[in-house]
Image: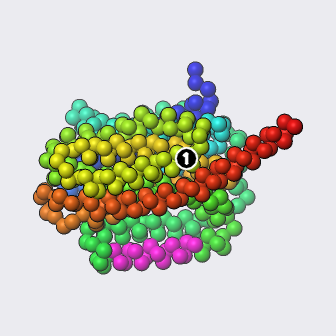
Amino acid sequence: MLNRESLIILSVCFGGFISCLDSSIVNIILPEVATAMNTDIVSVSGVTVYYLLLMTCTMLVWGKAADKFGARRLYLLGYIIFTAGSLLCGLSHTLNMLILSRCLQGLGGAAIFAIGMSIIAIYVPRHMLGKAYGWVATTAAIGLTLGAPLGGFITSAFSWRGVFLVNVPLGIIAWVVTHRAIPRNKEQLEVHKGFDFPGALLSSTSLCSFIWALAACEREGWRSQDFMIFLGIGMLLTILFVFQERRHSNPLLNPAVFEQRGFALCVGMGLILMIVLGGMGLVIPFHLIWSKGLSVGAAGMLMALNSVIGSIFNPLSGALADKIGAARMCLASMTLAFLISLYFAFSAQEPGVFSTVVLLLGLGLASSLYFPGGNALIMKLAPNGHKGAASGVNTTARTLGITIGASIFAALLPPHEAGAHLPETAMRAPWIFAAAILAVAIAMCFPLIRDERRKKRETVKLESTLAA
């Protein structure tokens, strides 16, 4: 029989799994949806784009709302919204209804994903945090891995609607487990402080503007009018957001969250790593299919290597982070990712797929070295009463990193026609860029290591004093 802590971790693991699964499973069914809805590729891509957009733009809001109204309450609400959105997706008969339903699903998925880490930080003992986040990272990686093959199987056996409808019983079961596992009276809520609704609106719209600017850059280039307009709107809204947060008594993004410099450093490293992983997810399929001549099925199987290696090593990495320190694990992760990116930048043009396999396995291992310990360290450094906001900042940075990476890597590819063979050196510029930003991430690790050593010395000194 599982104890309460194990049930809480299980609930959060399922939340991470289902959020990541639904961000990857839908891509494989888009051709079926386009045929059923009698629409084109550009229009049907909104089924994926708007899901990610709603997740990115509302995670910060959900995280702060958890501090105000309770993580348990909003986590349960997230499951309800996600399950209802899944049901509506499965029942949709028009593309507009499906996209609106996906927006609702993304809103619920954002709540589940953003609040999940603060649930663990609040209810799981500190000595178990690394292991707990390791299991969450593992189930998220499994969700990403199973997306394409599971979506294809369900669609073949039933229809594309089954991909969404299968979430309904799973969501109900998860809600029941969460409701019974998480106690009601352990949170420190900001009950006497008003909620920053203007800040929530400004943060969401500014993020949305930046994402649309990146999308315009990918379609039309850096000098396009749409890119300049949306970038300018995003910068203006960000400035207004900063002024709003400084004057509000209970801001959406409280400066207290960043009191520990290690928090900002860890979030920044996670953002950089997700930029690289997001870029990899976009350009490597083109590299395998257009440069190496692989079939779509074979390319999909190779891409799964990245998540499989993470699924294997995440629990071990989380336990190791608890023993040797999360900062050292972060340094190992960023160094490995830097070396692998630099290697691939100058070996991608070699015959065969060996260098690509090395890249996928190497970045999968680097991810498993960072995320369990990095997540645990982020939540440890977040002040009490602001765990939800810290979780929202962290998850927003991750999803934003995927979008930034995909856009920048696409812009760095040389001009080419659809289906045409990519130039031999097509991968060089994107992966030199990846190595450059990972070098910055390596430099960010050393202050963390110094802080970790100092805290360890202080703890030993205190224990010796008490023993005397």
Residue visible at 49% across and 74% down in the picture: 237
- Kindly identify the amino acid type of the residue bearing the numbered disc 1: Arg
Does residue 90 appear left or right of residue 379 in this picture? left
Q: Quadrant of residue 323?
A: top right
Q: Where does the magenta region start and end? A: 227-242
Up the image or down, 324 lies above or below 404; here it is: above
Up the image or down, 425 lies above or below 240; here it is: above
Along the viewing direction, whichever of 293 and 51 lies nearer the viewer: 293
Query: Do we see residue 108 in this rendering?
Result: no
Does residue 221 appear left or right of residue 385 in this picture? left
Circle 1 packing at 10 Å, graded few (<14), some (14-19), many (20+), is: some
Q: Quadrant of the C terminus?
A: top right
Along the viewing direction, whichever of 329 and 218 lies nearer the viewer: 329
Residue visible at 62% across and 44% down in the picture: 121
Query: Do we see residue 373 in this rendering?
Result: yes
Q: Among all residues in the image, which is located at the extreme left? A: 420
Residue visible at 58% across and 30% down in the picture: 6
Q: Quadrant of the N terminus?
A: top right
Q: Position of residue 440 (x, y in %)?
A: 47, 61
Q: Position of residue 438 (x, y in %)?
A: 43, 58
**Which residue lies under the disc numbered 1?**
328
Q: Position of residue 436 (x, y in %)?
A: 40, 62
Q: Among all residues in the image, which is located at the extreme right? A: 468
Q: Give the number of marks.
A: 1
Q: Main secondary structure of the magenta part?
A: helix
